[in-house]
Image (cartoon, rainbow, N blue to C red):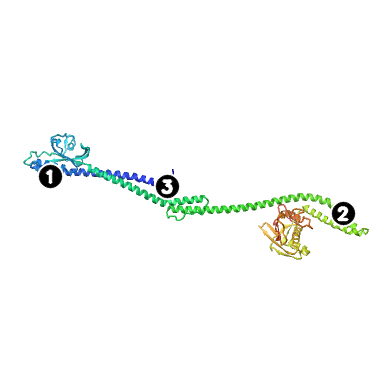
């Protein structure tokens, strides 16, 4: 069974209050009882004194009947249990209880032992010592007060008395007063105190419950609700309308914690997104590297294969071309066969060109690097091929970085790469367009040259194959070896070559060459600036 915090606090506080109030009530009732008992003893003593004073004159004139009548009238007062007079010999000379008149009391009995203590007669005794509390024959608690009747001068000189002057005490007036009134008062007071205690407990419990609910339970429930919302992932939940006490400070700390958690989650999400982007980028780079490795291995294997094939084909092809030329120039050749011989010669030349491309592809010549400017190399390439008919309707835009640093390259091989790139760009724009050439540096590590054309572009499915040998999109001409050779040249320079293209929008080739020589490389003695 779950007990709420407010119930625990109320029950605990009520129990503590109950214990303290019971202790206070006990002390209060005990003190009141002592005070009331002392008041009862004092009243009994005053009553004894009053009886002695009022009967003094009657005793002087020896009017005992009148004195006894007065004592009997006093005994009939409410609260007075009974009154008796005892002479010096212990005889009961008068009592409101007629049956004990004439009887004797022992000196050790109550009412006598106050004066006869340890065999000695005491003349002066305190009020407390003269009083006694006991239960009468009816079972009612009473207080008895013994008052000595002294032999005053007026008594010893009276004509009716024969008491000698040396006698100090003539007798004792013993008055018994009922304590029932005191007990009734105590019961009423105790009941009122119990009612007051119950009322105070209820009132205090209700007050504690109310203020605890308002000042503690309500804010705690707010915090609990917000905690559940936060546990559910709602980090926009904030505690509002907080107080300006410790609970308010706790709520502020809770709100601050919520904001910190929200910021942390946003940072984690941002890191997750960045991590996903970095992983995707890294995956793409790894795939590119794998593709480059596969392409490199493929090119190496293919290069060895085509090198052997080219050498085997080149010798018979040379003989075919030579004898075809001789036969074509022979005057004995029938003129109707001359056209056929021209076809043989042209196709043989075409085969020779393919064989030369195969040999260039398979030949892994070591670059003879010298410090050179890519701007100068590109300008020389444009001057070399820019006057060809395929460039007549094409605008060439140079966007060079003027302070482009010199880099170690084999100028002839790089020029061959630029020629292949520019020719491909011009052939993709048969109706004219523009070629933009841009140079720049990247991360103080590479010098980059970017060739952008506005031609027909390359289909997406062909982009991964354009550097493969014999792959070409030209149906009527081309060997498909230009880009493969260019790729091998840039790779041997320690650089990279990338391509981006969209159909009918154009193509962008980016060549990246290292700023400094690769490990173990040396430069030629002369430089080109």
> Disc 1 or 2, which lies upstream in sequence?
1
Residue 528, above or below 62: below
Q: Please identify the quarter of the rendering in which residue 446 is found.
A: bottom right
Q: Nearer the viewer, residue 192 or 127?
A: 192
Residue lying at 60% horizontally and 53% vertically, measured from the top left: 273
| Mark nearer the viewer, 3 or 2 | 3
Mark 3 vs mark 2: which is more N-terminal? 3
Q: Whole-percent x and y of residue 513?
A: 71, 57
| Quadrant housing residue 527 | bottom right
Residue 72 x, y percent position in the rendering: 14, 41
Q: CA distance from mark 3 to mark 2?
A: 108 Å
The residue wearing badge 2 is 320
Taking the image as shown, residue 122 lies to the left or right of residue 238, namely left
The one nearer the camera, 405 or 161, is 161
Residue 5, disc: 3
Of the numbered discs in the image, which one, if any, rests on residue 362? none
Q: Are marks 1 and 2 in contact (CB under 8 Å)?
A: no
Q: Going by the picture, which residue comes out furthest to the left?
A: 159
Pick the residue in front: 288 or 217.
Answer: 217
Local secondary structure at mark 1: helix
| Quarter-of-image position of residue 18 | top left
The vertical placement of 363 against 378, above or below, is above
Question: Measured along the vertical axis of the image, is residue 172 above or below residue 413?
Answer: above
Residue 255 visible to an observer of this rendering: yes
Which residue in the protein does label 1 denote? 54
Around disc 3, counting alpha carbons within 10 Å, would you say few (fewer than 14), some (14 to 19), or many (20 or more)?
some
291 lies left or right of 202: right
In the image, taking residue 402 as reference, residue 83 lies left or right, namely: left
**Which quadrant of the rendered structure holds the C terminus?**
bottom right
The residues bearing labels 1 and 2 have C-alpha atoms spaced at a distance of 179 Å
- The Cα atoms of the two marked residues, 1 and 3, are separated by 71 Å
Residue lying at the far right of the rendered structure? 332
């Amino acid at each position: 069974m779950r007990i709420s915090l407010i119930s625990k606090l109320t029950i605990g506080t009520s129990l503590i209050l109950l214990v303290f109030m019971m202790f206070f009530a006990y002390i209060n009732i005990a003190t009141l009882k002592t005070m009331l008992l002392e008041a009862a003893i004092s009243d009994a003593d005053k009553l004894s004194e009053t009886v002695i004073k009022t009967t003094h004159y009657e005793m002087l004139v020896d009017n005992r009947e009148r004195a006894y009548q007065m004592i009997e009238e006093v005994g009939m007062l409410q609260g007075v249990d009974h009154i008796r007079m005892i002479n010096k010999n212990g005889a009961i000379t008068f009592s409101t209880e007629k049956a004990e008149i004439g009887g004797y009391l022992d000196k050790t009995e109550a009412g006598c032992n106050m004066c006869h203590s340890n065999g000695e007669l005491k003349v002066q005794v305190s009020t407390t010592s003269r009083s006694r509390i006991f239960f009468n024959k009816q079972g009612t608690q009473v207080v008895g007060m013994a008052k000595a009747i002294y032999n005053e001068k007026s008594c010893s000189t009276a004509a009716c008395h024969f008491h000698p002057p040396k006698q100090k005490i003539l007798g004792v007036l013993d008055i018994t007063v009922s304590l029932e009134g005191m007990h009734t008062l105590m019961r009423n007071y105790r009941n009122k105190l119990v009612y007051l205690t119950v009322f105070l407990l209820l009132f205090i419990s209700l007050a504690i419950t109310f203020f605890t609910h308002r000042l503690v339970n309500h804010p705690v429930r707010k915090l609990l609700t917000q905690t559940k919302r936060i546990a559910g992932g709602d980090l926009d939940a904030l505690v509002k309308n907080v107080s300006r006490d410790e609970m308010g400070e706790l709520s502020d700390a809770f709100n601050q914690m919520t904001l910190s958690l929200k910021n942390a989650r946003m940072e984690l999400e941002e890191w997750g997104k960045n991590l996903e982007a970095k992983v995707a980028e890294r995956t793409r780079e790894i795939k590119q590297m794998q593709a480059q490795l596969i392409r490199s291995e493929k090119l190496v294997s293919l290069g060895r294969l085509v090198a052997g094939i080219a050498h085997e084909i080149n010798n018979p092809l040379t003989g075919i071309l030579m004898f075809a030329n001789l036969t074509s120039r022979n005057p004995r050749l029938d003129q109707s066969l001359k056209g056929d011989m021209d076809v043989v010669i042209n196709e043989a030349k075409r085969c020779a060109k393919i064989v030369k491309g195969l040999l260039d592809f398979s030949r892994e010549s070591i670059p003879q690097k010298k410090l050179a400017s890519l701007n100068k190399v590109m300008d020389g390439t444009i001057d070399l091929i820019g006057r060809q008919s395929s460039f007549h309707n094409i605008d060439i835009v140079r966007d060079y970085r003027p302070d482009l640093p010199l880099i170690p390259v084999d100028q002839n091989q790089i020029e061959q790469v630029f020629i292949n790139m520019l020719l491909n760009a011009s052939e993709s724009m048969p109706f004219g367009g523009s070629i933009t050439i841009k140079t720049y540096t990247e991360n103080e590590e590479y010098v980059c040259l970017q060739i952008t054309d506005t031609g027909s572009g390359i289909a997406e499915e062909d982009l991964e194959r354009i550097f493969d040998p014999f792959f070409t999109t030209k149906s009527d001409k081309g060997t498909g070896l230009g880009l493969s050779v260019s790729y091998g040249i840039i790779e041997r320079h320690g650089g990279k070559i990338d391509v981006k293209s969209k159909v009918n929008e154009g193509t962008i080739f980016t060549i990246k060459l290292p700023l400094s020589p690769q490990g173990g490389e040396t430069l030629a003695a002369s430089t080109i600036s």
